[in-house]
Amino acid sequence: MKKTDIAALLWLGALWGASFLFMRMGADQFGGMALAGLRAIGATICSLPLLVSRQRLAEMRAHWRAIAIVGLANSALPFVLFSYAAQNLPAGVSAISDAIAPLLVAASGWLWLGERLGASRACGLVIGLAGVAWLVAGTVGFGHGGHASGWAMAACVGANVCYTFGAHYNQRRLHGVAPLTVATGSQLAAAFVLLPFTVWLWPAKTPGTGAWLALFGLATACTSLAYVLFYRLMARIGATRSMVVLYLIPVFGVLWGLAFLGEPVTLAMAGGCIVILLGVALATGLLGRRPARAEALPAKLMGEAAE
């Protein structure tokens, strides 16, 4: 890869890692639902100019049902679940949990789609799940109590399950559709779905300036801008190399939480992160001789990214 491509990967990892920081900063004041809805609405407003072309509008009309389902699975539901989790978990923990998605994609491809799973990938799944167990066991008790933190971790896992479904669905139903059409159209669908809930669950007390700034960064930089950067990068270096960003998101998420919120880096966070990423590297084939198929993974990143 060129130096510019490496720099783009670092920027993308920093942006998606910062999304967990911004969610942590805004979730308490906005509430999980309002923050998720405004994130989707703001990202849609920023991304709509990308649809102003005959080709993309034609693709939207032809595939609007499938794009709407991807928007629900890859944006609307994960946004809500991660925003809820941000009220009870440190930003770094939520960012580390986002690395579960590639493990789930590999596992579900083996269980339900009949994809081959060699010894190295199977070992990666076991190692990755062990890292998840370590992370969950070591972080329950953060925030407002063990019970709340347990539900928050469950929300993070649920968000990644949604990403997994969205990845496989996108691969089967939207293969050949321009990625920017899917990304922008799915954000539009998510905004449409979340709008009434955002109005209904609007916070009684107006959020402060800091929360609004966090929302602005979340919608514009971490969602709209990050998607454009990702798809341009994928066009230059390919899907498999672009997946390196999955290893950068947890690292930057922990760093931003430490730098701006003073969140401690515990043994569970550090150890769980290392073990999960090792498992991801093996399960996705990045440490093997033959790279694993990575067509489904970019669809996961349409939502979060993700998160």
Image: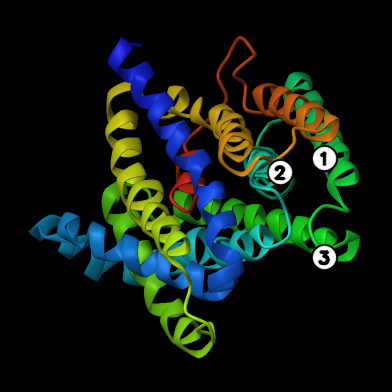
Q: Residue at x 84, y 34 (%)?
A: 268
Marks 2 & 1, CB-CB < 8 Å contact: yes
Nearer to us of marks 3 and 1 is 3
Residue found farthest to the left: 54
Q: CA distance from mark 2 to mark 1?
A: 8 Å
**Residue 87 sits above or below residue 118 on the image:** below
Q: Amino acid at mark 2?
A: Val
Q: Amino acid at mark 3?
A: Ala
Position in image of residue 134 (x %, y %)? 87, 37
Q: Residue at x 74, y 46 (%)?
A: 111
Q: Residues within 10 Å of mark 1 (few under 14, many from 20)?
A: many
Tell me the tag on residue 135.
1
Q: Residues within 10 Å of mark 3 (few under 14, many from 20)?
A: some
Position in image of residue 290 (x %, y %)? 58, 14
The quadrant holding residue 218 is bottom left
Position in image of residue 223 (x %, y %)? 39, 51
Q: CA distance from mark 3 to mark 2?
A: 14 Å
Q: CA distance from mark 3 to mark 1?
A: 16 Å
Residue labelled with disc 2 = 93
State the residue in front, 8 or 266: 266
Q: Earlier in the sequence, mark 3 or mark 2?
A: 2
Residue 66 appears in the picture as rendered:
no
Tell me the tag on residue 148.
3
Q: Earlier in the sequence, mark 3 or mark 1?
A: 1
Residue 130 appears in the picture as rendered:
yes
Q: Amino acid at mark 1?
A: Leu
Q: Residue at x 79, y 20 (%)?
A: 119
Position in image of residue 237 (x %, y %)? 34, 21
Marks 3 & 1, CB-CB < 8 Å contact: no
Q: State how many labels appear.
A: 3
